[in-house]
Image (spheres, grey):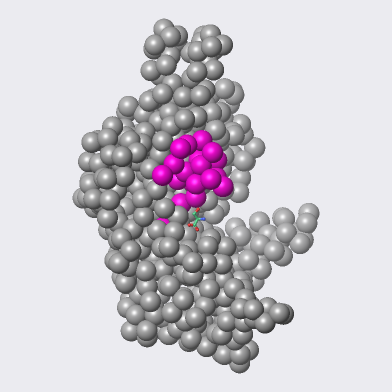
């Protein structure tokens, strides 16, 4: 029996050899991606490194199978093996999160949210309309009733966190389909503390009376009290939905429990599987029995054919997340994030909300005289991979922004700890404090141009790559 590390090296090497025989440039790009990831200090809050078992579960014959429908109830023959992996993924998800129902077909976070929105609309708007018309199916409605129902479906209200407070584009914002589907209003955060003000959320909910109250975020560095949000939803008759894509790993690892665990409080919870949860790129929906039937209609309602190879990988990753060491991993993510925040604060950085309770830190880079775009690029020149992000009431808008979002799930997977977070804070602070905003050709200030001495960026890039070199990425995988 080969050892696990030999087996992993052999598997990836053999796969590359097979690919190289057909299109060598693809094999080269795959190898180069691993090399780049190994070298860089990856601080993108939404990224991680899936396990070799998870990655390998995606490259196989399941990719060739159509499997519309649900386990045991498919629109295609021959789905018995897909049934096995989909049922396993759903079972692991239910057990891990304590949910009554799990739907593991969504291909991404947007897809998971669309499944949830349409499940809620079907439950709250379509089902009552069918009942009123004494129809069993939409096909049984008269043209006039169908016209009325379509208008009702397109005229519902959603209340979610504003984008610049850390909400997500798919929570009802105009550039996304959700903004075109819903009449949306958002709640912000307190201008002084940067924290969610639950009284203000309640006020907005009472006034607006949304059909859906959305909790969850992609750039808010604090815990959210989901019990309070549920109480607000109940008071105004809203369905409470939580998008936990960013912090699902912290829920799985029992860092967020009680009021901060969305699963017992929300009517429906969506997530991606590839962020802090450390699975394959994909999405998932959890709910109680009341919405289960509508959720299971996700495909073909808004999803194309399920991706059975990704569901297989979800089953593997969720099995990994049920192991005791995942809870330790989740705790280390937050310890690292807090150490990074403290290191930055000690060096004079300004952080939105003044710190973090979760996996991410949002630096307000206006304190360094920079836009988010300038800061992101200067950090990238220095081997530090982050992404720019709006801050509350951002004067620079969503493209240039005034913030840089950093997160610790990926570096924690590599094994970096709190000492290395302090070193990382030093590298980030050095780059940002040495970067100067640039000007346009006509002398006006540019929001994109900047100057950073190459000697500085080269030195920091070397320090960043030395730092991560001490924590080899995929140590069991040697591509030769
Ligand atoms: N793109 C993801 C993120 O970076 O937060 C969420 O959609």
Instruction: Confirm whether the magenta stretch covers residue 259.
Output: no
- In percent of the image, x 33 and y 36: which residue is there? 209
What x and y, as percent, mark residue 101? Answer: 35, 34
Residue in the picture at 30% in, 60% down: 190
Measured along the vertical axis of the image, is residue 218 above or below residue 88? below
Q: Is residue 178 magenta?
A: yes
Q: Residue at x 22, y 47 (%)?
A: 228
Q: Residue 359 appears at what percent x and percent y?
A: 37, 64
Rendered location of residue 331, percent (x, y)? 30, 64
Q: Nearer the viewer, residue 467 or 89?
A: 467
Which of 431 and 154 lies nearest the eye of the viewer? Answer: 154
State left or right for residue 411 relative to residue 257: right
Image point 29% across, 66% down: which residue?
193
* Relative image position of residue 342 (x, y in whole percent): 32, 78
Is residue 163 visible in the rendered image? The answer is yes
Q: Nearer the viewer, residue 439 or 313?
A: 439
Which region is colored magenta? 166-185
């Amino acid at each position: 029996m080969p050892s696990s590390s030999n087996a992993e090296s052999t598997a990836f090497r053999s796969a590359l050899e097979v690919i190289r025989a057909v299109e060598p440039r693809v094999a080269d790009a795959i190898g180069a991606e691993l090399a780049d990831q190994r070298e860089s200090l990856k601080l993108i809050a939404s990224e991680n490194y899936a396990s070799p078992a998870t990655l390998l579960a995606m490259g196989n014959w399941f990719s060739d199978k159509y499997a519309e429908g649900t386990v045991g109830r498919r629109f295609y023959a021959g789905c018995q093996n897909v049934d096995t992996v989909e049922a396993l993924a759903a079972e692991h998800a239910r057990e891990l999160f304590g949910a009554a129902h799990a739907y593991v077909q969504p291909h991404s976070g947007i897809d998971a949210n669309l499944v949830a929105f349409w499940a809620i609309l079907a439950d709250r708007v379509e089902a009552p309309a069918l009942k009123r018309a004494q129809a069993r199916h939409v096909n049984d409605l008269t043209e006039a009733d169908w016209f009325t129902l379509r208008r009702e479906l397109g005229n519902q209200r959603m209340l979610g966190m504003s984008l610049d407070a850390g909400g997500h584009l798919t929570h009802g914002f105009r550039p996304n389909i959700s903004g075109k589907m819903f009449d949306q209003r958002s709640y912000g955060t307190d201008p002084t503390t940067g924290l969610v003000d639950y009284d203000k959320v309640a006020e907005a909910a009472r006034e607006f009376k949304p059909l859906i109250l959305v909790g969850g975020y992609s750039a808010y560095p604090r815990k959210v009290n989901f019990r309070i949000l549920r109480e607000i939803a109940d008071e105004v008759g809203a369905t409470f939905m939580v998008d936990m894509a960013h912090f699902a790993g912290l829920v799985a690892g029992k860092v967020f429990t009680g009021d901060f665990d969305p699963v017992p409080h929300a009517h429906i919870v969506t997530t991606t599987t590839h962020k802090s949860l450390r699975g394959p790129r994909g999405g998932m929906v959890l709910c109680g029995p009341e919405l289960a039937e509508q959720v299971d209609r996700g495909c073909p309602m808004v999803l194309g054919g399920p991706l059975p190879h990704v569901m297989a990988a979800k089953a593997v990753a969720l099995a990994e997340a049920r192991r005791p060491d995942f809870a330790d991993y989740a705790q280390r993510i937050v310890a690292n994030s807090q150490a990074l925040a403290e290191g930055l604060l000690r060096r004079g950085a300004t952080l939105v909300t003044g710190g973090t309770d979760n996996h991410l830190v949002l630096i307000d880079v206006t304190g360094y005289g920079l836009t988010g775009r300038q800061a992101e690029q200067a950090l990238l020149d220095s081997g530090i991979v982050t992404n720019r992000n709006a801050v509350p009431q951002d004067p620079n808008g969503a493209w240039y922004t005034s913030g840089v979002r950093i997160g610790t799930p990926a570096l924690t997977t590599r094994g970096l700890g709190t000492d290395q977070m302090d070193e990382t804070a030093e590298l980030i602070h050095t780059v940002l404090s040495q970067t100067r905003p640039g000007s346009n050709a006509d002398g006006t200030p540019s929001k994109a141009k900047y100057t950073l001495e190459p000697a500085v960026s080269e030195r920091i890039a070397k320090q960043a790559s030395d730092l991560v070199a001490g924590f080899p990425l995929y140590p069991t995988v040697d591509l030769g």
